[in-house]
Amino acid sequence: MNINDLVGLMLEITTLMGVPPVHDLPAIIQLPRKEFKIQYGDASAMYVRPLIYHHGNLSKSILVHELAHHVQEMTGRYGTTMNCEVSVLREKEAREVQEKW
């Protein structure tokens, strides 16, 4: 995915989330499958501010989900405290954005 495609996708996501555009883009890093599995288990991708890690074949749908997490972080949507309740809310919103997209 080139930078223009990524910017366009971010604009779509921020529109779906009802927030202003986010101009900071995350780095997208592919790790070897074995290393990714050790770090993140069965996930296809993982957002760890400000990076998105994946182990290959990153679909646009999964990328949208992870970019939604990036938007949440960059806009401070759920504050700075991470707990179970916040984690559930973040995942729910990221899934909703992914489905709407």
Image (cartoon, helix red, strand yellow):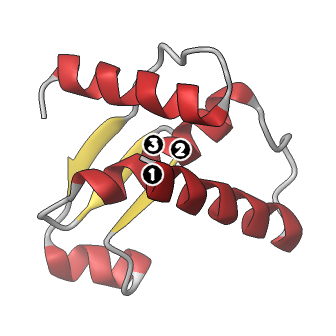
Against 8, residue 37 (above or below) is below
Where does residue 61 sit, x and y in percent of width and height? 32, 56
Marks 3 and 2 sit apart, C-alpha to C-alpha, by 4 Å
Where residue 69 appears, x then y in whole percent?
56, 47
The amino acid marked with disc number 3 is Leu
Q: Secondary structure at mark 2?
A: helix
**x 19%, y 82%: residue:** 34
Between 29 and 96, the one lying in front of the other is: 96
Q: Which mark is residue 68?
A: 2
Q: Classify 23 as above or below 57.
A: above
At x 45%, y 42%, the residue is 67
Residue drawn where x is 45% and y is 51% of the image = 66
As drawn, is 71 to the left or to the right of 81? Answer: left
> What mark, if any, has residue 34 been given in the picture?
none
Q: Amino acid at mark 1?
A: Glu
Q: Are marks 1 and 2 in contact (CB under 8 Å)?
A: yes
Identify the residue position indicated by label 3 in the image: 67
Q: How many marks?
A: 3
Q: Is residue 53 visible?
A: yes
Spatial separation of the CA atoms under disc 3 and disc 1: 4 Å
Describe the element under mark 1 as helix, strand or loop.
helix
Q: Are marks 3 and 2 in contact (CB under 8 Å)?
A: yes
User: Pointer 1: what residue?
Assistant: 66
User: What residue is at 14 percent from the left and 69 percent from the top?
Assistant: 32
Q: With 76 as the anchor, is 61 left or right in this view?
A: left
Instruction: Report if residue 49 is visible in the image.
Output: no
Q: Amino acid at mark 2?
A: Ala
Tell me the CA gap for discs 1 and 2: 5 Å
Secondary structure at badge 3 equals helix
Q: Say if mark 3 contacts mark 1, CB within 8 Å.
A: yes
